[in-house]
Amino acid sequence: MIKWIAAFLGYFLFRFPGAILGFIVGTLLDNLGGSGSKSRSVFKDLNKQTVSPADFELNLLSLCSIIIKADGKVNQRELNYVQQYFLSTYGKEKANAIFRTFNEVIKKRELSTQRICNFMVQRTRYEVRLQMLHFLFGIAQSDGQVSGAEIQKLREIAGYLQIGQHDFESIMAMFIKSADNAYKILEIEKSATDDQVKKAYRTMAKKYHPDRVVTENEAIRNGAEEKFKEVQKAYETIQKERGIS
């Protein structure tokens, strides 16, 4: 029953694409089961000055929805990426409670990206916000490419999260390949000396070490490990290219 209601609401707001999205989300909720009356709707007045979001996962989910809609369409692979993330991270019971707000988040025509990011800045360490940006890039790339509109939105989010330009470029290089990706990941120029390469690697390995990501969110911690591996891979690539021992 939920899937048909969600499909109807999605069609009413966004026509055919909205109906598809509503049906998918409603089907997930039907499969997970549980009582809808127990779920919270913390986004009800998200754009009002007097109301503050009160849950990390729901704010993260809201940022997910912003990226999913960044290029003007809802891609099934991006939606699946988010669904699998929440199911594998939180399990069915908690994911059920979180996803009961998902359709509401998606339906909103306006979400205050700045206010959501301000909430995260006030309550999370810089290293955690780096992992959040890494995860959002993963969503954008899950359909095979990161569009220009998605990059623009990711830049905006990074700015609100107070993430530095060099860190943004480093993370983006992990998803958008180019000839000098390894150098971008280490935040150095290709003309850097071998000693500068080694120093950059030590700096980046320290910055992205999973132990610095203090959070109870398992997937964010896993993201830190993935990024740490990307830093190691970038250094190994340059080592091989230059013959650095």
Image (tube, rainbow, N blue to C red):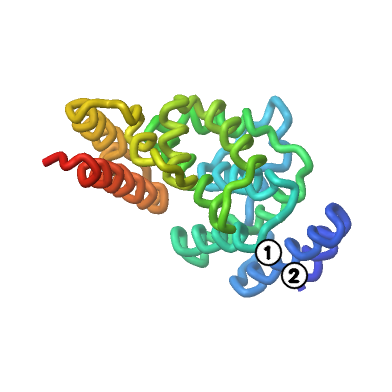
The reply to whether discs 2 and 1 touch (Cβ–Cβ < 8 Å) is yes
Residue ID at (52%, 63%): 84
Q: Residue at x 73, y 61 (%)?
A: 21
- Look at the numbered disc 2 and give the secondary structure of its residue: helix
Whole-percent x, y for residue 89 in the image: 44, 59
Between the C-alphas of marks 2 and 1, the distance is: 7 Å
Question: What amino acid is found at the position of numbered circle 2 in the picture?
Answer: Lys
Give the farthest residue toward the left.
245
Position in image of residue 98 (x %, y %): 58, 55
Mark 1 residue element:
helix
**Most foreground residue, 8 or 82:** 82
Residue 3's disc number: 2
As drawn, 75 above or below 31: above
- Please, what is the three-letter code of the amino acid marked with disc 1? Val
| Mark number displayed over residue 105 | none
The quadrant of the image that shows the N terminus is bottom right
On the image, numbered disc 1 is attached to which residue? 25
Q: Is residue 115 left or right of residue 130?
A: right
The crowding category of the residue bearing disc 2, from other C-alpha atoms within 10 Å (few below 14, some 14 to 19, many at least 20), is many
Residue closest to the eye, 62 or 67 = 67
x and y, in percent, of residue 239 in the image: 21, 42
Q: Residue at (76%, 44%) from the top-left corner? A: 108
Please state if 15 lies on the left or on the right of 111 as rendered: right
x and y percentages locating residue 148 in the rendered image: 64, 41
